[in-house]
Amino acid sequence: MSTRIPIVEGLPELPATDVLDALRAAFSELAGDKAAQPPQTVTLLPGGGDVIAYQAATSDAYGVKVSPYLPQADGRAVVTAWTLLVSTRTGRPLLLCDAGALTVQRTAATSALAVDELARPGAAALAVIGSGPLARAHLRYARVVRDFTSVRMYSPSLTTAAAPEGVSVTGSAEDAVAGADVVLLCTSAAEPVIDAAGLRPGTVVTSISTNAPRAHEIAPAALASLDVYGDYRPTVTATAGEMVIAAERGLWSAGHLRGDLPELLAGTCPPPGGDRPVFFRSVGLGIEDLAVARLLLDRS
């Protein structure tokens, strides 16, 4: 007899605290060797395009997100993402969900976890570079982990009327980050958007990944002047554009990464020294997709 698999299209509203707790638990499982996180794989498609697969496993579930990038004749591309959750006890599929919105939420929540671990307890000034769905999700999650009293946002197309509540719009990225305690980079840029090395000591900068080849939101040369952390040591140093470029040019090496999220949560890596800006880079992990998919399954 067949069992109907729950299919979730879109992402139901999930409390930010629940998503953060789910990710914190998943990264802690990874730190305790109770989860597996293989590198992402890219399959090049005949005729162009590719499919990226993000996998992960815990003691009771395996998850894989497949994200096709399909160029079209009109110059645009179809980009989708689907996450499948499978029981590692029965081998049966448990959930299939449209992972587009899921990816936005897990990416923002991962950045917020890093802010919670790396930013000063009294961090009050926040800057957000970007104004799209990822930027707004980052703002939502960052406000959960710190009580920001000043929030500035910059995007070339952003107007004051379209800004989120309680956010001041600036005329440049430089104006947005001036004096900030935390800077969230949420762009699709393939080149630097701020001077990270020029920020105040202790300022935390988070950066996310995009589909652009070797994409980077800060200059590779800046890494040598920063306390650098990542989402997961084995994958971020091999994938993040600025880290790859800096290593190729002899400006920085993977051995200088101070820690990753599993290590930060387990207390097995050094905290920021306080004398330099802090940089956190995420490239996206299957363990994040798995964590949110398990949360969706609990509510389906």
Image: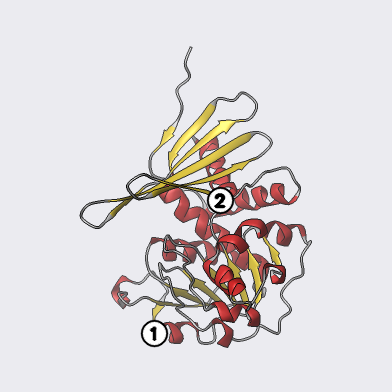
Nearest the viewer among 77 and 206 is 77
Which one is closest to the eye, mark 2 or mark 1? 1
Residue 45 screen position, x and y as percent: 38, 45
Q: Quadrant of residue 12?
A: top left
Nearest the viewer among 160 and 264 is 264
Instruction: Find residue 172 and name its label.
Output: 1
Q: Earlier in the sequence, mark 2 or mark 1?
A: 2
Observer able to see residue 113: no
Hey, what amino acid is under mark 1? Ser
Q: Label 2 neighbourhood size at 10 Å, few (<14), some (14-19), many (20+)? A: many
Q: Secondary structure at mark 2?
A: helix
- Residue visible at 31% across and 71% down? 162
- Residue visible at 54% across and 55% down? 284
Instruction: Find residue 19 and name its label.
Output: 2
Residue 260 screen position, x and y as percent: 68, 62
The answer to whether 284 appears left or right of 253 in the picture is left
Residue 181 screen position, x and y as percent: 58, 79
- Residue visible at 77% across and 69% down? 270
Numbered disc total: 2
The answer to whether 227 appears left or right of 240 in the picture is right
Q: Secondary structure at mark 1?
A: loop
- Residue visible at 70% across and 85% down? 275
The answer to whether 140 appears left or right of 160 in the picture is right
Q: Label 1 neighbourhood size at 10 Å, few (<14), some (14-19), many (20+)? A: some
Hey, what amino acid is under mark 2? Val
Observer able to see residue 189: yes
